[in-house]
Image (tube, rainbow, N blue to C red):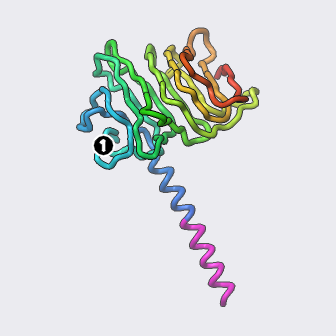
Amino acid sequence: MLTTVRNLRKLICLVSVVCAIAAFRAKAANLTWDSDGVPPVTDGSNFWDTLPTNIFWFTGTSDVVWDSVSTALFGAGNGTAPYTVTIDDGSGTVNAAGLTFNNPGTGASYTIAASGSDTLTLNVANPLISIGTGVSAAISAPIAGAFNSSTGTNNTTGLIIKSLSGNTGTLTLSGASTYTGSTIIESSGAANTGTAVALTGAATLGSSGSNVYIAFN
């Protein structure tokens, strides 16, 4: 009888873990930056945090608080000026699965900055930073995270930076990033189809010993 009870408890624990993992995966999605927190989406500057009163992320139906597991999308095509989204969270970081920079409008661009020593933590093993066609984006916030390491042989793992639809875009990095693992700058295999990655100031592509690869898919 005792053995049966123990087995039942183990089964309940296992089911609970599986349900928790499923719920986490179901929650992760794409959330679009909405600078004024009122649908429809409006391009603009503001602070990126997890305060319950700051509902700057559009789900497709309503604006919500940043959930720390989704991919952050920037650019709704209605902007007219350069915008800065500043990470300023009480924890010292915001977590995301990746970032996508779409066209924010005529003459507009986005910079992801950090207040003080705050960081941008990409919290998956193979995060993706995607850049739209002709889009110039910048990340001045230091990037943190523990990413996979590529072997350099048909093994595209690590932080992946690539252009959407195989077209050109530009990403400027200026933060002293501390992430571990590889950095992959990926093109579609054709000439002039990759993202141009520019490093300025104290920018680093990960911690000391991290590898950088140019990949063709």
Residue at 65%, 78% (x, y): give it: 7
Identify which amino acid the numbered label 1 is placed on: Ile
Question: Left or right of 131: which side holds 126?
Answer: right
Q: Is residue 151 above or below residue 2?
A: above
Is 127 colored magenta in this rendering?
Answer: no
Predominant secondary structure, magenta span? helix
Observer-nearest residue: 56 or 76? 56
x and y, in percent, of residue 204 in the image: 61, 24
Q: Indicate the secondary structure of the residue bearing disc 1.
A: loop
Q: Residue furthest top?
A: 191
Report which residue position mark 1 lands on. 55
Quadrant where the N terminus is found in the figure:
bottom right
Residue 212 occupies which quadrant of the picture? top right
Return the x and y of residue 45 as percentages of the image width and height. 32, 27
Q: Residue at x 54, y 38 (%)?
A: 122
Residue 11 magenta: yes
In the image, which residues are magenta? 1-16
Q: Residue at x 44, y 13 (%)?
A: 134
Q: What residue occupies the far bottom of the structure in this picture?
A: 1
Q: Quadrant of residue 104?
A: top left
Report x, y in % for residue 198: 55, 15
How far from the left and from the top, in percent, is residue 37? 26, 38
Foreground pick, 213 / 174: 174
